[in-house]
Image (tube, helix red, strand yellow):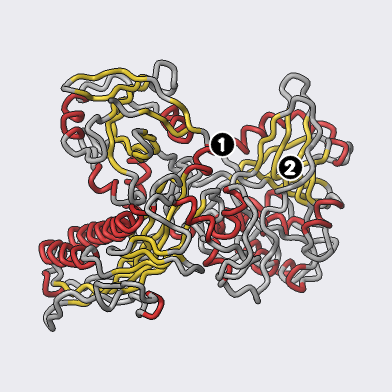
Amino acid sequence: MLPKLRISAFLLKRLERVKLQCSGCLYGVFYGESTLLLLSFNVESSVGELNYEHIQHKFPAELDLCGLVKFGDCTDTQAHLNEVISSVDITDNPILLQCQLGTLVGLRASFFIHGKLEQVPYEVMEAPQLYNDFCFTRLKCGFFLHTSPTQEAIAKEMHALRKRVADGSLVFNVSQTKIYVSSNCGTQHQSFNSDSLIEQLIAEIPTPTESPSGNKKKAAATAPELAKYYGAVGCAYDVINIDVLRCRTRELGGGDASSHPALSVCITNEDPSKQQVPLELEAMAMLCKKTKLLRLYDVLIESICRSLRLFEQCLSERLNEQETAASETLLLSPRSYHFYPQEFGHFLSCAYLEQLSDDEPSVQEKRKRLHRQFALPATRPYFRRANQCRFQGDIDTVDTSTWTPLLNTHLGVRPSGVTDGKEYLVNGNYHYYHYLQQQVQDKGWGCAYRSLQTICSWFLLQGYTERAIPTHLEIQEYLHKINDKPSSFVGSSQWIGSTELSMCLQGFLNVDSKILHVASGAELSTIAPELAMHFQTQGTPVMIGGGVLAHTIIGVDYCVQTGQAKFLILDPHYTGADDLSTIQIKGWCGWKSVDFWDKKSYYNLCMPQRPILY
């Protein structure tokens, strides 16, 4: 019987954006009785190269190669199909999707069965159902790899290391619980039996309001609510954190696995002539919550092995790039980074060498290749280290003694009230900068400086730069340096406008800006369509200045039929404490009509453009 086919709504949107004739590989999860859920794809990086073996290592365990996708009238489909068929392991019936360029109209899905393609219907799985039905596991562990600096030696030692990982000696503990998972005893807990499911395990994980002993049962919660406690920022999936232990003997029996030491180091053959490379990895897996707990141990082991293969690939690529002799080559340390591009609806992992920065040409080229393979735009640095996923448990341990401004203050504001309008909002994270922060007495003159700081925070938080937010003094010094202002300007209380902002963005961040002029405040509604397009294509905060006042626009609600518009304003003139409730209720962050601006003043808008950056 053919599997039941479901396709993630995230995947369909990505397929629709492909405008080039090509083919690629499909990746999915096989779950339940016989259901295949398609979640991701990559396109050929160059003519005829699918690279699915390397790509698959970047996905969480259980997200596997399952078929081929064809865009337009691609002529090499049969050759690629034959290649993929021989490599698909999770099903005997590989899938073929046939897509028209730039549209989902006419999308056809067919299973390969008995040498022929048989077209089948499919269901679309929307985001809420994905979040409700699936979860991820995440674990950390470390090893030392002893190897000579050659590809052959690395491959041999990595193979030996994976065999040791899979030999049954590891024991896993679900964080904050007394639930242990071992090779010979399965998942140990008084509430579980051979038919227990992953969702039952999730129900046993305590929230911060209850003790790890589980004395207080938590109320039922939605996936986004649970993610608040043990998920990831920007991700509505449940993420189950796993601790890795090592069993002293193969017979765990009824003993308490917590008495065994945590696994931090595992050493392959020691040899003084070999180099020692520390491997600090994080491994992830994707599971349907209806999956039986009996499978959990094998899935966790596979997630570690997949991460080790990714490390092996990373080390080998570095050796290919170097021209030095093997005896002079120093192996660098790889590290795991998890990313959660919103367009994907799933995690993707990369391995980067710690000693190489994001601006290293080889690292930039690696990210550029990922953008091509996943058909992603070049104006969003998805895979820079600054954009790695922040997991809730890690964030809770961060030092909060240093001051940071409020993040994304527009979330939760009251609706604009525009009838039949459509909201176009800032795309990404930002910090709210306003008067009197950081003990700077800038009331009455520093509003544009604060708007610039908010804009710079957006570029910092999206991974476009690692430069610290410029201070008022640094802004003034730069404008004097480029001869825009006299020396008397430095250290003064003089205000700046949108033109000066655009100069600073270019000088500090290498970011170009578009300047838009409006004759009066009454005419601001006429530029609502242009602002809507800006937030759709660029997504950056916009500074608007007129007279001696500056504000930050972070959204527009616009009705095409009536022309009515309101603007989501972040007001830098606020002088109070960073209390979100006060800021929203009092309107320091909120929707404003055109009456908010002076009808007699002209206005300039500084609209930062995303740079081409991988």
Q: Taking the image as drawn, is residue 102 in sight?
A: yes
Check disc 1: other Cα within 10 Å, few if <14, some if 14-19, many if 20+. Answer: few
Q: Quadrant of residue 595?
A: top right
Q: Position of residue 505 (x, y in %)?
A: 59, 54
Q: Amino acid at mark 2?
A: Asn
Left or right? Give the position of 519 relative to 328.
right
Nearest to N terminus: mark 1 or mark 2 = 1
Q: Amino acid at mark 1?
A: Thr
Residue on which disc 1 sits: 537
Q: Position of residue 487 (x, y in %)?
A: 70, 69
Placement of the N terminus among the 4 image quadrants:
top left
Left or right? Give the position of 8 relative to 246.
right
Q: Residue furthest bottom?
A: 272
Secondary structure at badge 1 equals helix
Q: Quadrant of residue 179?
A: bottom left
Secondary structure at badge 2 equals strand
Q: CA distance from mark 1 to mark 2?
A: 20 Å
Mark identifier at residue 594: none
Vertical arrangement, residue 420 with respect to residue 574, above or below: above
Left or right? Give the position of 490 relative to 69.
right
Q: Position of residue 4 (x, y in %)?
A: 36, 28
Check disc 2: other Cα within 10 Å, few if <14, some if 14-19, many if 20+. Answer: many
User: How many numbered marks does the figure carry?
Assistant: 2
Q: Taking the image as drawn, is residue 354 in sight?
A: no
Front residue (pair 434, 550) = 434
Residue on which disc 2 sits: 604
Q: Nearer the viewer, mark 1 or mark 2?
A: 1
Left or right? Give the position of 131 relative to 154.
right
Residue at the (16%, 36%) spot, across then down: 86
Q: Position of residue 28 (x, y in %)?
A: 35, 38
